[in-house]
Image (cartoon, rainbow, N blue to C red):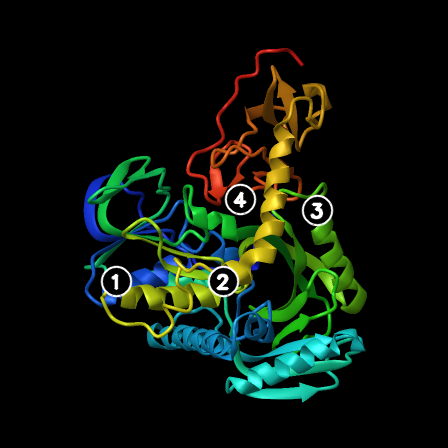
Amino acid sequence: MTTSIWKATAQKSNFPPLQGDITTDIAIVGGGITGITSAYLLARSGRKVVVLESGEVGGGTTGDSTGNLYSMIDKRLHHIQSKWDKETAGKVARSRTAAVDLIGELVRKYSIDCDFKRVPWYLFSETNKKDETIEKEIKAATDYGLQVEELQELPLPFSVSKAIKVEGQAQFNPAAFVKGLSQNINSGNCSIYEQSPVHHIEKGDKLVLSTPAGKVTANKVIMATHTPKGIYALQTALYPYREYAIAAKLRSGDFPDGIFWDTEAENHQSMRVYRKNGENYLLLLGGHHKVGQEDHYEKFFQRLEQKARKYFDIDRIDYKWSAQHYKPSDGLPFIGESADDNIFVATGFSTDGLTYGVLSAMIFDDLLNDRGNRWAKTYDAGRFTPIKSAKTFIKENINVAKQYLKDLPGKSEVDSLTEVKPGEGKVIEIDNEKWAVYRDDEGKVHSHSAVCTHMDCIVDWNDAERTWDCPCHGSRFKTTGEVIEGPAYSPLDKRKMISKE
């Protein structure tokens, strides 16, 4: 089983599921860092808010993230500067700094037990092949008032050619932060419901959100779901990827405080330490691929473990997990009102979602209270940037088109059920239809349509996490068919096995 160190060590939340029909001003779909911070700020300003979380607060992408907070971005500030301009890159750096500062302020104000700590951020190259990247980032960070230092060595067990150090960044347990903040939201203005997935939003003068046991009627809706639920043109500008992480307990030795990014690692790896209850854990993160487009997913965990054991004295791997992120076509997130009136979205965070999630909440608080926000235009969800987006847009959507070819007759992984071993999932063609067939460890067969309920792409089996993943727009499903994440609302359709094995 895969689970993050954050989920395993955070306190439990205990909000009820929605029962019956209620009315509110603003409905928020999703109880991660974007949704809960939005709820906190809006309730504080006097707005009536309802949060609908499909699982547990902080238990989705937020709880599977890195726990790192920084002004920098994974595509580098100098990349934004070259694609856009200096002014835009400066707004990105300053807005992200403000979001990190707000998290620190909330932690102090409510004494949230989430191991929040200010640490430096490092970007380094192991050889001189990537020194130019470091030099460009040093200049960009200096331009925007960040505390920058250039280094030629780091306290790491391997050689470094060049590095940049940026002070004043931070780390925390994101699941613990979100759960702690949820307990401090003005309960008179906000209700939170767990185990309440939204299956449909009826659009009209009012927005009606349907859950398994109730409905919420709202004037406005915030989609705090990492990618918008349902079908949006915006999704052609969003590209789903997964990244992997392990938490390795150190037998001896230690690891310096800080966020360490390697420019040259094959899988864009990063490292940090997490200390809990007197034990030291090395967190190693990396691996990068389109959702549902690999043959063997477990290899990404194996590569991380191999690197950890190569350089550190590892006792055991206690936790391993992966997380999803959505890359935007033009390098910036989409935050604001969508093409649908009164529905607001926050998406395209790439691997920088914790900081962008809080920034989204700050923007929503201003927009929904009719206040100006100095960063709203930069991240406008309705922007049209064909020149900045063209190369990535064409490449990624050709990739999506290729995934639909999997639905051609005769394209299946195995020919019969007998070839599906316990613990395995395979796509089988039965009566000219693709089935997603999983045999559990006890030998019981679970069969569903292999057609994703979002936009009819054929799902792929993820052997590392035992899920069905859609390679087109990133929807993911349990072996029992229920939606885990992504734009799909509905579970995979069940199929009854009639033929004998």
Residue designated by label 2: 353
What kind of residue is marked 3?
Glu
Q: Earlier in the sequence, mark 3 or mark 4?
A: 3
Residue designated by label 1: 368
Residue lying at the far top of the rendered structure: 499
Between circles 3 and 4, the one closer to the viewer is: 4
Q: Residues within 10 Å of mark 1 (few under 14, many from 20)?
A: some
128 displayed left or right of 95:
right
Q: CA distance from mark 2 to mark 1?
A: 21 Å
Between circles 2 and 1, the one closer to the viewer is: 1
Which element type, helix, strand or loop, lies under badge 2? helix
Q: Nearer the viewer, residue 96 or 456?
A: 456
On the question of residue 255 being in view, the answer is yes
Which element type, helix, strand or loop, lies under badge 4? loop
Residue in the image at 39% along x and 64% along y? 360
| Marks 3 and 4 in Cβ contact (< 8 Å) | no
Q: CA distance from mark 1 to mark 3?
A: 43 Å
What kind of residue is marked 2?
Gly
357 displayed left or right of 184:
right
Q: Nearer the viewer, residue 77 or 169?
A: 77
What kind of residue is marked 1?
Leu
Q: Nearer the viewer, residue 230 or 484?
A: 230
Q: Which mark is residue 298?
A: 3
Q: Earlier in the sequence, mark 4 or mark 2?
A: 2
Q: CA distance from mark 4 to mark 2?
A: 18 Å
Q: How many numbered circles does the render carry?
A: 4
On the question of residue 184 being in view, the answer is no
Whole-percent x, y for residue 172 in the image: 50, 69
Residue designated by label 4: 473
What kind of residue is marked 4?
His
